[in-house]
Image (tube, helix red, strand yellow):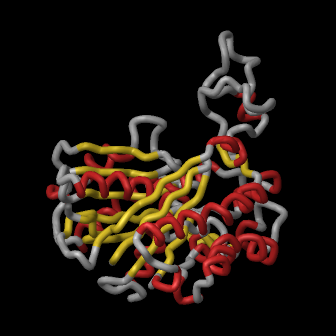
Amino acid sequence: MPRSIIAGIGMYVPKNVYTNKDLMQYMDTSDEWIVERTGIRERRFADRKGETTATMGIEAAKVAIERAGITPQDIDFIIFATLSPDYYFPGCGVLVQRALQMKEIGALDVRNQCSGFVYALSVGDQYIRTGTYKNILVIGSEKHSFGLDFSTRGRNVSVIFGDGAAAVVLQPTEDPNRGLLSTHLHSDGNDAEILAMFNPGTHANYWKEGLADFDEAPVGQMFMSHSMVEKAQLFPNMDGQAVFKKAVVKFPEVIMEALRTNNYQPSDLKLLVPHQANLRISQFVQHTLKLRDDQVYNNIQRYGNTTAASVPIALCEAWQEGKIQPGDLVCLAAFGSGFTWASALFKW
């Protein structure tokens, strides 16, 4: 059975750089406060007009396809991971198919937030292994900046996130010394509301009081109402401490699961590329697994948390910087809303 190999990888980040000091114009915060809690010093925000989740994903895809030595016409399946699609529906996958003038191939959209890219990679890998497709485009892209609360009220969330995209082309390989060895996917919905964006949505408002407003709806709850806007109910909600406590347990677990499944130890890793959620989480995981600094790649300092795009952006930068060579053991890992978490282990 063939394995999946990343034949091409590319990334795209907006040109607009916003430092922590820039955010001080909109909220009561400081560079020191943000760096101490998250490790983030700056992030990229997309242009207000013309730059979307799909367009950023398309730019990243163009680079990945070119580096794979193929054309858009050679792609036979698209998997697009995002929590911030251009439209509520349809998904971004078909927008990529249209923009790149691809054949009438399948397009799948994955909504697993921070772990979305690793989940998408796992789906693509199964298609490669079964011989269903031979050139699969996997994209992670996010435009958070259009939906954040840039005020003191929302600073605990808004200072964390940034915009960007990255993409890979998966192809089959028969080389026993290379390829995706295994993926590992998990979820636990018991604390789903700890990290969530409740509105707009179709939930019945039975989880917690105050998540939405029924006053304007004749039956049930309206998808969106003036009251939701007035009460600032259209922004993400996060209990940061609770997320941290869960992440520092599940991150090491899923990484070790991948290593043990394939008879490796942490010391065998050339590089761990974690989801860029919080530098403190990555440092905690590094300490738990007893990894050296050169074994863990972090770039959250420059881009913030780009959720589904963070793992492939970091992977692309690591590859561009020459930190990954053919045959190196590389682990990707992510944890996020849901909660969902996942890992993927490569012989690069």
The vertical placement of 116 against 170, above or below, is: above
Residue at x 55%, y 66% (from the top left corner)? 275
Which residue reaches farthest top? 218
Q: Is residue 15 left or right of residue 201?
A: left
Which residue reaches farthest right? 28
How many marks on residues?
Answer: 0
Q: Is residue 139 left or right of residue 28?
A: left
Q: Quadrant of residue 60?
A: bottom left
Residue at x 66%, y 11% (from the top left corner)? 219
Location of the C terminus by quadrant is: bottom left
In front of the other: 33 or 6: 6
In front of the other: 12 or 291: 291
Where does the image place residue 62, in percent across and percent down from the top left? 28, 65
In front of the other: 210 or 222: 210
The vertical placement of 221 against 293, above or below, is: above
The vertical placement of 126 against 244, above or below, is: above
Q: Is residue 166 visible?
A: yes
Q: Quadrant of residue 291?
A: bottom right
Where does the image place residue 157, in percent across and percent down from the top left? 72, 56
Residue at x 43%, y 52% (from the top left corner)? 81
The vertical placement of 213 against 309, above or below, is: above
Q: Is residue 155 visible?
A: no
Q: Is residue 103 left or right of residue 254?
A: left
Where does the image place residue 86, in percent across and percent down from the top left? 45, 45
Location of the N terminus by quadrant is: bottom left
Residue at x 41%, y 65% (from the top left corner)? 166
Q: Quadrant of residue 189?
A: top right
Where does the image place residue 127, in percent across and percent down from the top left? 26, 52
In front of the other: 254 or 325: 254
